[in-house]
Amino acid sequence: MRLKLQKTDPEAWKLMYGIEQHLATTGLSATHRHLIRMRASQLNGCAFCLNMHSKEARKDGETEQRLYLLSAWRETTLFTAEEKALLALTEEVTLIGQHGVSPATYQQAAALFDEHLLARALMAIVMINAWNRIAISTEMPLEA
């Protein structure tokens, strides 16, 4: 059995949750946060986070159809321009070691969001990537 980070280092865990609580109050919509979390978790293959965040997204009104088609978001008309910009940014930040964040992707997001919302989106992307890595490396069990 692997360690439980929240028990082994509760102060670090608390600080991570503090950032999440901050992000929830900053103007980045719940829908945007859910899409960021779901897409990064898909790319990272994090079953724990996909399970948790899909439940949260549905609870907050996200549709099954959009959740099912999220991995093919470029092929649909179900997502707004802002959502598509965030999804593209999420993908490039999550896979940053492949090609970095392209100027086109960054500029598209910067054109649609003011610098504060863009900063918060980047923090939300960084946070879910951190949570994915914790959940995967510690083999956090799925909740029923």
Image (spheres, rainbow, N blue to C red):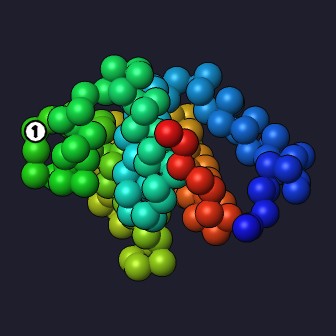
* Nearer to us in this view, 84 or 37: 37
Residue type at the position of mark 1: Thr
Quadrant showing the N terminus: bottom right
Instruction: Indicate the quadrant where residue 32 lies.
Output: top left
**Residue 89, percent across and down?**
39, 54
Local secondary structure at mark 1: loop
Q: Is residue 89 visible?
A: no
Q: Residue furthest bottom?
A: 98
* Nearer to us in this view, 31 or 80: 31
**Residue 139, percent across and down?**
62, 63
Q: Is residue 60 left or right of residue 121?
A: left
Instruction: Indicate the quadrant where residue 140 lies.
Output: bottom right
Which residue is at a point 43% across and 69% down the rendered structure image? Answer: 95
Seen in the picture, residue 66 relative to 94 is either above or below; the reply is above
Seen in the picture, residue 16 relative to 91 is either above or below; the reply is above
Instruction: Indicate the quadrant where residue 17 lies.
Output: top right
Name the residue tied to disc 1. 77
Which residue is at a point 44% across and 48% down the rendered structure image? Answer: 50
